[in-house]
Image: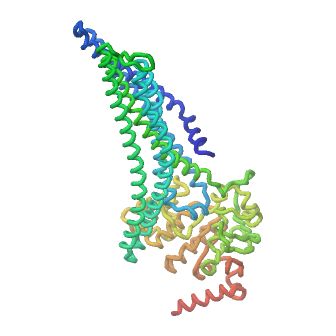
Amino acid sequence: MSYKKYIKSYYIKFSGLLLLGILADIIVDIVQLYIPDFLGSIVEIVSSKNGVVFADIKVIVIKVIIVAFILFIGRIVFRMAIMPASHKIEAGIRHDMFMKAERMSQRYYHENKVGNIMSWFSSDIEAVEEFTGWGTIMIVDALFLSSLAIYRMCSLDYTLSLIAIIPMFALIIWGNKVEKTMSDKWEERQRYYDRLYDFTQENFTGIRVIKAFVKEKQEQKAFKKVAQENSDKNLEFANLSVGFDVCIELIIGIAMSMVLGFGAFFVYRNSINNPVVFFGKPVMLSVSQLISFIGYVDILIWPMIAMGQILQMHSRFKASLIRIVHFLNEEEEIQNNPNAIKLKNCKGKITFNNFSFIYPKKDRTILDNVSFEIMPGEMIGIVGKIGAGKTTLVNSLLHLYNIEKESIYIDDIDLMDIDITSLRSNIAYVPQDNFLFSDNIKNNIIFSNEEVEMDKVKDAASFAAVDDNIKDFQEGYYTMTGERGVTLSGGQKQRISIARAYIKDSPIMIMDDSVSAVDVKTEETILNNIKEKRKGKTTIIIASRVSTVSSLDKILVLNAGKVEAFGKPSDLLDTSPTYKKMVYLQKLESEL
């Protein structure tokens, strides 16, 4: 979809408000053109040889008050119509972008930094909102107010009108040539803003590491460099913008000077009965007409300024909207099959059939011809060296990446044929990084279902052996976890993540190295709770310690992306060198 077609759909959607605002703005433009007529009439009355007639001035004053009232109401109306419409357009675009962001695959976020994406959601959307709001008002004024003012000027005198209009046409021609340069400069400025945003976000996220390694000064220097580059690009755009504004003011000043100079000369020649003749036609301009004409030129100044601002706004609007639409046009890799099957009454049977996996745009095979079967209700452990593909294996069950058909089955249904929402609804997942939201503990636990009663929340915390820790906090379950759970220890974050998964009560539960930060006794408590409370439900536990999985039904041993062994723990000592070595090393470690 092109950026023009995309924004056009929003203009159509909010056309009612926009048309009301535009109509009110046109009425304002028409009405304010009476003011120069009133000024001319007052000058004519005052300079009349018959003396000042106060009754006539009173009538004009009443008309001015009426015009002022109409202008007051009209400006309120067009602001209350156009500005809310622009805010609604902004909200709609932001909603489209957020929904798009949720649908994008893991690969996209591996290749695009968070800072870049956040700048699209902030400064780029603001540039679009600015143009659809104030830009619309300025376009109406530039078109209608300037056209009406020029018409009134021409009705007074064609010659003086031509003198005033020539600079404006020069402004339009020059402005069109400058717009492309301004658009390119704005896009370049946005790219450097992306870098600044991304650098800042990354440093705030890793602030503890920076402090731990005493790298504050080094990061300050790096930030200074990034900030300076961003500042330089902002100054380049600002200089171009200011230079454009100065040229506009100069052109306006020249136009006004020419009107005043030539107008005074025409009035003087007319007053001595020797009018200036242009193209065979005398210029019959009176003082009152010159005052009215100057009033129209004064009104014309705003549309001329607006034209310059419109060009600047449009250059920012175009560059920002192209970036936004480019994001919205990104291919969504993870999508439902047109005939997707909803996973109902899931039993928890999982089959891997010669499953191989390579990350997008990578050459190295992560998993190679993996085949094994998990029966409903089994508790399975997965072990292997770092980089063996353990996390990739379980992530594949969540359809975070597209895989080959007929390689993974859930309840004998091809994973690629299962509706994504129903698939993920039937799997409770404890990720390796134990991400917690910046909220209280209770809300983190009930993330999957906000209507869960407090008793079940406490039961989930007891299941994860974290209930006692939570009770020790001053605010208990309403203790704020901080950003990414920064106020909690690693073990507490792990166990709250386990409680969050357990309360979902899904047929399949995956724990990715989720008890590595707890002591052996707590680990034993959690494993006993899993055996007791998840009996009959499939549970997969990835572990770095053999002791974690030694009591499970079966263990899968991965070595360099391949299945080295799969079976009961007692059998693996004879069939798996990797498992045997892990047992020996951990036994040696415990003896030491």
Q: Using the rendered image of the protein, determine whether residue 422 is visible from the camera's viewpoint.
A: yes
Closer to the camera in the image, 144 or 328 = 144
Q: Is residue 450 above or below residue 22?
A: below
Q: Is residue 312 above or below residue 331?
A: above
Q: Residue at x 58, y 38 (%)?
A: 8
How has the structure been colored for display? rainbow
Closer to the camera in the image, 167 or 435 = 167
Is residue 470 rendered to the left or right of residue 15? left
Q: Is residue 142 above or below residue 445?
A: above
Closer to the camera in the image, 231 or 407 = 231
Residue 548 occupies which quadrant of the picture?
bottom right
Q: Residue at x 31, y 23 (%)?
A: 265
Residue 279 occupies which quadrant of the picture?
top left
Q: Position of residue 508 (x, y in %)?
A: 65, 65
Q: Position of residue 263 (x, y in %)?
A: 33, 23
Residue 107 occupies which quadrant of the picture?
bottom right
Q: Using the rendered image of the protein, determine whether residue 63 is visible from the camera's viewpoint.
A: no
Q: Position of residue 423 (x, y in %)?
A: 67, 58
Closer to the camera in the image, 303 or 458 = 303
Is residue 222 rendered to the left or right of residue 586? left
